[in-house]
Image (tube, rainbow, N blue to C red):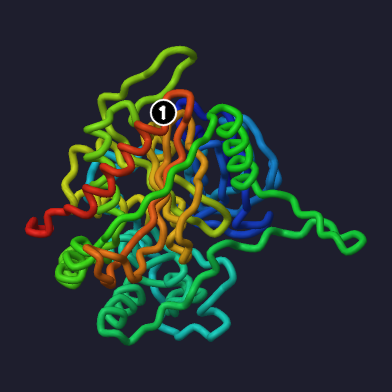
Amino acid sequence: MATIEVIMPQMGESIAEGTIVKWHKKVGDPVKKDETLLEISTDKVDSEIPSPSKGILKKILVNENETVEVHTVIAHIESEGDGEAVKEPEKDATAESAEPQPSEEKTEPAPVTEKSSPEQEKPKDRFFSPLVLNIARKESVSMGELENVPGTGAGGRVTKKDILKYIEDKKAGKTEEKPVEAFAAPHVEVSRGGVEVVQMDAMRKKIAEHMVQSVKTSPHVSSVTEADMSRIFTFREKHKNAFEKREGFKLTYTPFMVDAVVKALKKYPLMNASIDGDKILMKKFINIGVAVALENGLIVPVIKHADEKNLTGLARAVQDLAVRARNKKLVPDEVQGGTFTITNPGIFGNLWGTPIISQPQLAILGVGVIKKRPVVIDDMIAIKPMVYISMSYDHRLIDGALGGMFLQTVVRNLENFDDKQSI
């Protein structure tokens, strides 16, 4: 028997410490190599950490919600075979590609022939093999859906056969996706005198710190406008079925928004800059952050060199980053280096919002719900799919005139969308 040390991995060159969010195993539990052992949180991203070896979890040295420096030993596994301490994960190949590529597949656990009981089919903390996760990601199966896929493998585990059958049934309209709560309820620590005292989780604490710091750094100014989405609405309706059949995921409005913003940033490059003391840093690249809502917060993965991608490339990048963000498969580099951010309060039916700037960027665009409503055109009333668009910007450098011109350029790019192009 060999004792394998599990260490706090360094998730990026600038990462100095990590917080244990959750242990998926208890002391004495058996673990398999590459099975999710714990979740950690850094100031950049949350990640699931796999077990470095098959064996028994003998000792946990760092408890949940504790923060330690990278390379600190956090647990011991008693292993029958050879194993290695958890090391810094390699960068996902998809970070450099517009089209999602499956990561290296690992051996799927062997299915058993005996049917699992209903209690086994939906265990509380389900483990999914890397192969199953890769298939789910490629076929746009959310984690919420995956949690409800009946498993025929050992302990109710979802096998390759199970996920492929689910996808086949879904395409045939035989499945119904169950709604997932947008945000998980926080854990109640103490209750006293009718007041519940709740401890923030690691992600919420970091979000709070970043938001307070942003407001302290930048004097925020907000502007709101609206855009007629008729051309894009018609284009999407015309191509969405063929697109989904070809690409394996739905064509949303987000890539159209990214495309319109990228073109506006090319016209007004100061909106793509940042401030360093009394110096202006003009960026020669355009990296667009797209906010993704998770169960316990918000994360903003970044589309690198968005100006080099066409509409299809942007759609692939948005889908890939969103799926991996929800599956906790992002690496720190994929949430860094943004030059402009787009967030979508409209996903929850809201008309518009006033988002907080992601430092050190100078602006953030908020997209409201796209909704048909009556508008006046040439003294006549027409029904159009309209959207409110808001923007918060740093008044240290961006004045109302520049902010307003930039915002109206985004509107023109949306309203004059070339609906003769292919996707």
Along the line of sight, which residue is nearer the eye, 159 or 20? 20
Q: Nearer the viewer, residue 254 or 319?
A: 254
In the shown orientation, is residue 150 left or right of residue 288?
right
Count the marks: how many? 1
- Compared to residue 406, the image places residue 182 above or below, namely below
Pointer 1 local density, CA inside 10 Å: few below 14, some 14–19, many at least 20: some
Q: Quadrant of the C terminus?
A: bottom left
Choose between 50 and 78: the one closer to the eye. 50
Residue placed at 40% from the left, 45% from the top?
Answer: 365
Q: Position of residue 410 (x, y in %)?
A: 28, 45
Helix, strand or loop under label 1: loop
Where's residue 184, x and y in %?
Answer: 61, 62
Picture quarter containing residue 238? bottom left
The residue carrying mark 1 is 398
List x then y, in percent, for residue 385: 30, 67
Q: Residue at x 53, y 64 (%)?
A: 182
Left/right placement of residue 195 relative to residue 359 reads right
Residue at horizontal 32 percent and vertical 63 percent from the top: 386
Q: Nearer the viewer, residue 393 or 148?
A: 393
Residue type at the position of mark 1 = Ile
Position of residue 257 relative to residue 128, above or below, is above
* Residue at far front of view: 379
On the question of residue 319 being in view, the answer is no
- In the rendered image, is residue 343 in sight? yes
Say which residue appears at 29% left-offset and 65% top-offset: 376
Where residue 239 sits: x, y (%)?
15, 68
Instruction: Check the image and report above or below for 3 versus 420.
Output: above
Asked if residue 8 is positioned above or below residue 165 in the image, the reply reads above
Query: Is 200 displayed left or right of 423 in the figure?
Result: right
